[in-house]
Image (spheres, helix red, strand yellow):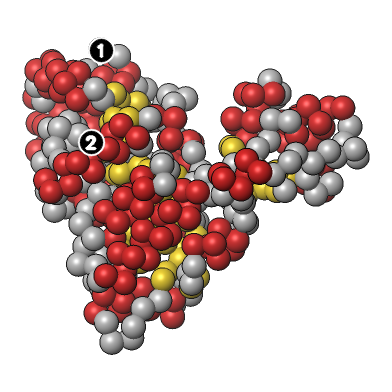
Amino acid sequence: MTQTEALMVLNAIPGLSGEGIKKLIAVFGSANDILSQGPRGLLEQGLNQNLVTNIVHFPKDKFLEREYNLLQQNQAQVIDISQDSYPLSLKQVNHAPIVLYIKGNHQLLDSPALALVGSRQATSYGLKIAEEFACVFAQAGMAVVSGLAYGIDTAAHQGCLKVKGKTMAVLGCGLNHIYPKENIRLFEEIATEGLLVSEFAMDTAPLAYNFPRRNRIISGLSLATIIIEAKDRSGALITADFALAQNKEVFAVPGNVDSPSSQGTNRLIKEGARMALSAMEVLQELGLDIKSQLEQEEVQPKIHINLSVEEYKIYEFIEHQPNHIDVIAEKCKQDIGALMGQMVHLELKGVIKQLPGQYYVRV
């Protein structure tokens, strides 16, 4: 059994959390070593009897056979937290998922992204704002992350796709399920043009307690989270809490003080969240005041005569669209340590800008 397969099995065992898996790996050495333990070894680590029974008697081979059949049927794949293809932005947060099931353009996982979430019972105002924000973010080269739910999530995905942008939908169920079913066409469009993401085994049903968990992935994949309409007790507010715990920025769109759909967002602003009056304002406050894709095509490249030969070699690989330092290092074949020193010089000369999460853009 491979490392990824062993982690898929552990991820599917009832009662075993991602943090529990990490602790057991620290004790036993690997995911496979956990699965090879007898009851006594697991009990000695303080696990309760029910969980030990679940681990020891889990039908590993049957599960993996069914999982691979469903992966093939759905044209999906699995990555685990130890692999280079696992998104760096998510790997760095607490309680990162052990495995991710993905379907679509996997390169989006390391794209600079913004989360747009909000109420399922959205007003026409909220839907309009969500679509407008998503359009602007997409045209600015950002991926838009949301949860495929009714209301704000749906409008955000649709707005992004409307302008041929890239969007990621994080699901509260396995990729073998479409929830809500009314979003089947949107699900299929995202699978083709964007990316579907889930931490749950392929045939996991859309159970209510799965959805709060998936919100940490939405915020974890994003540079910042923007809340558009949320009641005082809303899943969108859980996403905001996760973002803050991950040291990510939280923005909220203000609404009518007498609207139940705006009680949560207005309270977030009162408690210190940044007010989002427009999508461009969000981009500017994050230092993402970059041109839209159409505008970029019209901009003639500047010649910076004050750059050394080595600096210019690096500068050539930095774009108007944000790229992570790891991507830049790979493109210019530079060691990260040496590259970081050069990036400081380029910033001081005012030709590039560092964005949150170690992303860089041309000025």
Label 1 is placed on what type of residue? Met
Horizontal arrangement in the rendering, residue 244 relative to residue 104 (left or right)? right
**Mark 2 closeness class: few <14, some 14–19, many ≥20 residues within 10 Å:** some
On the image, numbered disc 1 is attached to which residue? 1
With 192 as the anchor, is 110 left or right in this view?
Answer: right
Task: Tell which of 88 and 165 is nearer to you.
Answer: 165
Quick check: 216 above or below 18?
A: below
Q: For the residue labelled by badge 2, is the local secondary structure a helix, a strand or a loop?
A: helix
Point 31% across, 21% down: residue: 4
User: Mark 1 vs mark 2: which is more N-terminal?
Assistant: 1
Q: Is residue 45 left or right of residue 180?
A: right
Residue 20: % across, % down: 28, 39
Q: Which residue is mark 2?
A: 188
**Residue 261, which numbered label?**
none
Residue 185 in which image quadrant: top left
The residue shown at (31%, 68%) is 126
Q: Residue furthest top?
A: 1
Q: Nearer the viewer, mark 1 or mark 2?
A: 2
Q: Is residue 85 above or below residue 247?
A: above
Q: Quadrant of the N terminus?
A: top left
Q: Residues within 10 Å of mark 1 (few under 14, many from 20)?
A: few
